[in-house]
Image (cartoon, rainbow, N blue to C red):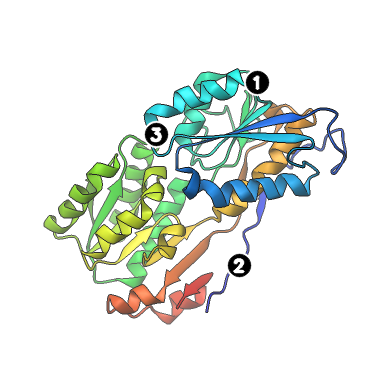
């Protein structure tokens, strides 16, 4: 049985400013919305569909008053800059950037076309915006508080496997958030008396070697930081990690669907659907500089009991009662 609570979003500092046209009123001309993603089209399909549903609910009908220009780097980071420039050359009205590296590529490509970010940890420290309350430039959107969530994930894994003291932390050192993730994980492990074992994989070809390192370093459990490449390779990554017979906690719930033990994260489908509200306001005249960055107010703890049983783990009742979704 699967149970699930919905994720709600609230303004991080102040509510979004209401503008001009009412919802449902068609635009005078066809508007173009670019969607820039690192992950493959197949992996990103549920999120794009959620965004389009959000736009439809706000009165934007594909082929009628809006068209979408979707480009995907198919997991190849080196393609992002060219794809961002392609959207700029197509004169899109707004760009939805689907992760930190996509946001950076869009930022390099334009300082005038509005950019709506979705999956990003701390946009201020990363240099995307001036502040959460007043972004100040051409970028706005949602911050998912990824660094703070990583600490909670490590705590949740510790509750499930309290005897595990050596925790492998899998990181992508090419990610803009790498340093922040490492600092957060180190602090969380130290607070719990755990030893953090750093394992790096920044390309799909490095995943098998990373898993071998996890085993050779005598790790007793694994935490996988949130990353677009890991998400894109989630089935392959889970298959590799399954051979270790170690409990694995992920920063993205989709990894648990693929067989991981647990995750603690916000609902990215809800994040993308919510991004439509930003795009709607921008297409109706709002300036990104004036639209405050929003943050999720709720996060989901997802546990895969099938995986727990396969590993011989008994999930404490206190954790099960806290879980937002239990897969049996």
Which callout, 3 or 2, points at the residue further toward the start of the chain? Answer: 2
Seen in the image, is 129 located left or right of residue 77?
A: right
Please tell me which residue is depicted at 51% across the width and 47% down the height of the picture. 44
Disc 1: which residue: 91
Q: CA distance from mark 3 to mark 2?
A: 31 Å
Q: Secondary structure at mark 3?
A: loop
Q: Is residue 62 above or below residue 322?
A: above
- Kindly indicate the quadrant of the structure image that contains residue 250: bottom left
- Kindly indicate the quadrant of the structure image that contains residue 284: top right
Disc 3: which residue: 176
Q: Secondary structure at mark 2?
A: loop
* Residue 80, numbered circle: none
Foreground of the two, 318 or 1: 1
Label 1: how many residues lie within 10 Å, few (<14), some (14-19) or many (20+)? some
Q: Is residue 49 above or below residue 253?
A: above
Q: CA distance from mark 1 to mark 2?
A: 39 Å
Disc 2: which residue: 5
Seen in the image, is 129 located left or right of residue 74?
A: right
């Amino acid at each position: 049985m699967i149970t699930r609570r919905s994720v709600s979003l609230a303004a991080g500092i102040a509510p979004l400013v209401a503008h001009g046209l009412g919802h449902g009123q068609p635009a005078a001309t066809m508007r173009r919305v670019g969607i820039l993603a690192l992950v493959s089209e197949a992996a990103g399909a549920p999120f794009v569909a959620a965004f389009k549903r959000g736009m439809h609910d706000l009165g934007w009908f594909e082929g009628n008053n809006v068209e979408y220009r979707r480009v995907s780097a198919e997991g190849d980071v080196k393609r992002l800059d060219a794809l961002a420039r392609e959207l700029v050359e197509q004169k899109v009205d707004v760009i939805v950037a689907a992760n930190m590296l996509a946001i950076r590529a869009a930022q390099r490509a334009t300082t005038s076309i509005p950019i709506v970010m979705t999956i990003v940890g701390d946009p201020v420290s990363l240099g995307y915006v001036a502040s959460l309350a007043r972004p100040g430039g051409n970028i706005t959107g949602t911050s998912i508080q990824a660094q703070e969530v990583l600490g909670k994930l490590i705590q949740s894994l510790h509750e499930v496997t309290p005897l595990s003291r050596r925790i492998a932390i899998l990181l992508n050192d090419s990610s803009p958030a790498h340093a922040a993730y490492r600092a957060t994980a180190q602090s969380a492990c130290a607070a719990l008396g755990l030893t953090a074992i750093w394992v790096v994989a920044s390309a799909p070809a490095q995943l098998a070697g990373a898993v071998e390192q996890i085993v050779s370093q005598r790790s007793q459990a694994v935490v996988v930081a949130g990353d677009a490449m890991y998400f894109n390779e989630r089935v392959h990554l889970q298959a590799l990690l399954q051979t270790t017979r170690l409990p694995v906690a992920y920063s993205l719930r989709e990894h648990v669907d693929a067989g991981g033990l647990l995750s603690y994260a916000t609902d990215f489908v809800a994040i993308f659907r919510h991004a439509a509200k930003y795009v709607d306001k921008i297409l109706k005249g709002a300036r990104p500089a004036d639209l405050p960055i929003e943050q999720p107010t709720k996060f989901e703890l997802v546990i895969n009991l099938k995986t727990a049983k396969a590993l011989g783990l008994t999930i404490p009742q206190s954790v099960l009662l806290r879980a937002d979704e239990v897969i049996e």
